[in-house]
Image (cartoon, rainbow, N blue to C red):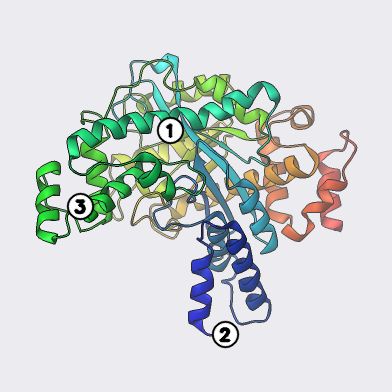
């Protein structure tokens, strides 16, 4: 088969039709097994924070596509994280299993932190509001008493988006969106985000103004800028979002208490879904993040056991600035508290890398810490899925006296376990099994 055929199959991995994605992956894997496609040797790089097209990926990548590219790229561990849903969970874990990729799944949302009600944390212009994650999820099922909460995570953002589109439509006349017909078709499960809406506005404007000069004049007038590529460049979409949807814009409404779930409730939900509640870090420049020690203390009291960092946001190559100093500080702090560090590049904005540059001068000293966190989350995911003995469960509480001991075990398991041997853990029926017995069991396998 030609390279073009490979490219066509890889494009099919992004189809909204799940059967087409599965078929394309099957054919690609057959080509790889026959030697027609070569995978990069598995290295030490990781990305556990890739948004799929279930919550907007700038390249339109599906869970299957992300798994495939992670394998081709040679990532040691890869993970998807989507906003407010885990619609891609089963697909990603199944695809990763088929291609022997160490994988995990997360969810991201925004939460309210009462203790920081008057301080901006990491959601710009929104005091008390913080982006928040759960990592290592293994099932879409949750207990009956949390099903309404799960549905609310999807429903509240949708209503917020619909209301916002109504306000922005007034501002952008004659470019007006029909949410059901213009926005929802861009999201495979209907979980549209602000970024989907920006793309929809760019496309609607191009349909309204057939003349390129008229289109340019329209956007210049509305956005007070001419620094964008038509008809739907990433810079144009970013301007639409900044000028019509973010704080101070026509479409924005300041969230009040009750607009987002409290962090403690979100953590209860994440734990019930088998995940690890995870605090997120932006860059340490906000009032809230400048009190990161207090923030972590409050988060830990509600169940948080890990922290997420987007390394690419936290340094400028060749520059030793405050962001880099903050990055090194938060990594050192997390290490001292035995909090696993989860990293990734998100890919929910044009131009973001598929994987961070861990060989850079700034990140190289931290790469081992990031790999350790990835192995811990992978091991948790497998243990939770196969035998219900994950990082946050009763078995871990009973078998580890310290967080350091727990991290040592899960890192060891995550680094040594082969994907082909994951089912061995499913043979464990005795909850009295020791960590050492588990390691011996997989080594024999």
Instruction: Report if the CB atoms under discs 2 and 3 are less than 8 Å apart.
Output: no
Residue at mark 2: 1
Q: Describe the element under mark 3 as helix, strand or loop.
A: helix
In the foreground, 32 or 180: 180
At a point 52% along the width and 79% down the height, the residue shown is 5
Of labels 2 and 1, the one closer to you:
1
Q: Which mark is residue 158?
A: 1
Residue at the far right in the pictured view: 430
In the foreground, 226 or 419: 226
Res 117 visible: yes
Counting residues from the start of the chain, the first of labels 2 and 1 encountered is: 2
Residue at mark 3: 208
In the foreground, 249 or 422: 249
Q: Describe the element under mark 2 as helix, strand or loop.
A: loop
Counting residues from the start of the chain, the first of labels 1 and 3 encountered is: 1
Tell me the CA gap for discs 1 and 3: 25 Å
At a point 77% along the width and 37% down the height, the residue shown is 388
Q: Which mark is residue 254?
A: none
In the foreground, 259 or 133: 259
**Which quarter of the figure has residue 435?**
top right
């Amino acid at each position: 088969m030609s390279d073009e055929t490979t490219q066509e199959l890889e494009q099919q991995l992004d189809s909204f039709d799940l059967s087409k994605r599965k078929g394309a992956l099957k054919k690609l894997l057959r080509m790889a097994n026959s030697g027609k496609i070569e995978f990069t040797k598995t290295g030490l790089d990781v990305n556990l924070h890739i948004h799929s097209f279930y919550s907007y990926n700038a390249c339109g990548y599906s869970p299957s596509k992300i798994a495939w590219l992670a394998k081709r790229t040679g990532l040691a561990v890869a993970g998807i994280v989507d906003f407010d849903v885990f619609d891609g969970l089963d697909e990603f874990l199944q695809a990763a299993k088929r291609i022997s990729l160490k994988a995990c799944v997360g969810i991201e949302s925004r939460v309210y932190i009462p203790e920081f009600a008057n301080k901006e944390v990491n959601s710009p212009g929104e005091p008390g509001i913080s982006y928040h994650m759960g990592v290592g999820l293994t099932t879409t099922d949750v207990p009956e008493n949390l099903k309404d909460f799960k549905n609310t995570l999807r429903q509240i953002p949708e209503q917020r988006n619909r209301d916002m589109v109504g306000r922005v439509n007034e501002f952008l006349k004659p470019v007006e969106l029909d949410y059901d017909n213009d926005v929802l078709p861009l999201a495979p499960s209907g979980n549209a985000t602000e970024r989907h809406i920006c793309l929809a506005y760019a496309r609607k404007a191009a349909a309204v103004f057939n003349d390129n000069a008229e289109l340019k004049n329209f956007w210049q007038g509305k956005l007070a800028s001419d620094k964008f590529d038509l008809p739907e460049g990433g810079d144009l979409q970013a301007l639409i979002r900044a000028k019509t949807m973010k704080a101070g814009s026509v479409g924005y409404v300041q969230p009040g208490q009750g607009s987002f779930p409290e962090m403690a409730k979100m953590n209860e939900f994440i734990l019930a879904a088998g995940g690890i509640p995870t605090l997120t870090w932006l860059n340490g420049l906000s009032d809230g993040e400048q009190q990161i020690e207090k923030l972590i203390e409050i988060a830990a009291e509600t169940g948080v056991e890990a922290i997420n960092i987007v390394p690419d946001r936290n340094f400028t190559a060749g520059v030793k600035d405050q962001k880099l100093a903050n990055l090194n500080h938060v990594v050192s702090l997390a290490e001292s508290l035995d909090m696993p560090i989860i990293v990734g590049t998100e890919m929910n904005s044009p131009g973001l890398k598929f994987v961070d540059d861990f060989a850079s001068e700034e990140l190289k000293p931290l790469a081992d810490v990031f790999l350790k966190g990835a192995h811990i989350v992978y091991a948790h995911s497998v243990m939770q899925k196969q035998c219900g003995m994950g990082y946050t469960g009763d078995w871990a509480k009973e078998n580890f006296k310290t967080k350091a001991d727990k991290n040592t075990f899960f890192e060891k398991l995550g680094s040594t376990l082969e994907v082909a041997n994951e089912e061995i853990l499913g043979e464990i029926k005795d909850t009295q099994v020791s960590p050492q017995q588990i390691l011996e069991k997989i080594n024999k396998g």
